[in-house]
Image: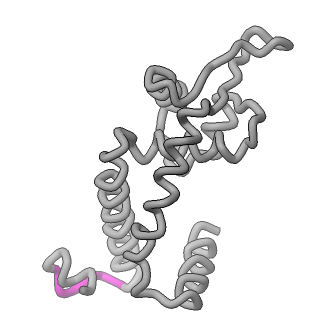
Amino acid sequence: MGIGEEIKQSTFKSEYQKLLINVGFTSSWMERTASCKLRAYKLTPQQFNVLRILRGQKGNPATINLLTERMIDKSSNASRLVDKLVKKDLVKRQECPSDRRQVDVFITKKGLDLLSKIDKEEEKWLAEFKGLSVTEAKELNRLLDKLRG
């Protein structure tokens, strides 16, 4: 269904306005979809993002600043997210031995195990994008990268 049908709007000021609305609508749709899927694991998309970043560190620590730089949702409070993940025993905080003001964050075995469970489900989730061919997905990725400059 086209964006005009989705939001019950038949005309737009320009294709650029339509694009702005379409990208925003699609982003919101993707966020809702991710939230619903992750709810079963008691995670938010932002918490999931932090766990994936930490897994990508391959056992090396991450600082709060590193997490903030790499997060998809730049408006998220990485420190608060880490606190919530610590309470769930999915990550641990450790004072940096060389700089007591810095806190190192590590993913725990429980966090890695949870991500492994989610990885098994992710293929099913990605099926929602099968309306696009691999070539179309590559082109859309290229265009979105170009849009952001």
| Residue furthest to the top | 100
Quadrant the C terminus occupies:
bottom right
Above or below, 9 against 84 in this view is below
The secondary structure making up most of the magenta span is: loop
Where does the magenta region start and end?
9-14
User: Which of 108/140 is in front?
Assistant: 108
User: Which of 83/11 is in front?
Assistant: 83
Q: Residue placed at 27% from the left, 80% from the top?
A: 3
**Image-based side of 28 in relation to 57, left or right:** left
Residue 29, percent across and down? 31, 64
Quadrant the N terminus occupies:
bottom left
Q: Residue placed at 39% from the left, 40% from the top?
A: 43
**Image-based side of 100 in relation to 85, left or right:** right
| Residue furthest to the right | 98
Above or below, 3 against 99 in this view is below
User: Which of 139/126 is in front?
Assistant: 126
* Quarter occupied by residue 64: top right
**Image-based side of 132 in relation to 64, left or right:** left
